[in-house]
Image (cartoon, helix red, strand yellow):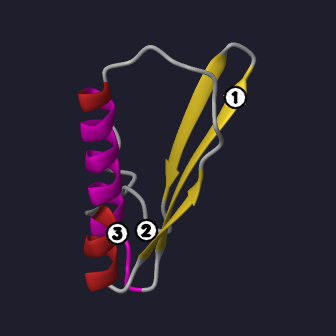
Amino acid sequence: MLNSVALVKSMRISYALRSPANIVANEAELRQMLTNLVNNALEAMQPEGTVSIETLEQADAVCLTVSDEGYGIASELIPQ
């Protein structure tokens, strides 16, 4: 679904997903979190931008990173 939204906006989503160890998590909550993060990223970027989603293992943890090429949050809004 998110790939379709990105294509309509002339953007793309890049995946670098490794097969991490089994984790205990609520799948519905993780799905909603990813949907929100990617939607926010797509709204913050100009056309031709890329959202990157990556997983990696660090010690006993699995890290999930979502990054974009958007302009970021204005410094005066960060305290809010």
Q: Is residue 2 left or right of residue 15?
A: left
| Residue at the spot of label 2 | 71
Residue 74: image x %, image y %? 36, 57
Report whether residue 80 is seen.
no
Report helix, strand or loop for mark 2: loop
Gap between marks 1 and 3 measured at Cα: 25 Å
Queried whether the magenta region covers residue 44, the answer comes back as: yes
- Give the magenta range: 29-47
Screen quadrant of the N terminus:
bottom left
Q: As rendered, which of 46 and 11 lies closer to the eye?
A: 11
Q: Does the residue at mark 2 contact the one at mark 1 (Cβ under 8 Å)?
A: no
Identify the amino acid type marked 1: Glu
Gap between marks 2 and 1 measured at Cα: 28 Å
The residue sitting at 33% across, 50% down in the picture is 76
Q: Does the residue at mark 3 contact the one at mark 2 (Cβ under 8 Å)?
A: no
Q: Is residue 33 left or right of residue 62?
A: left
| Residue at the spot of label 3 | 3
| Residue at the spot of label 1 | 57
2 or 1: mark nearer the eye? 1
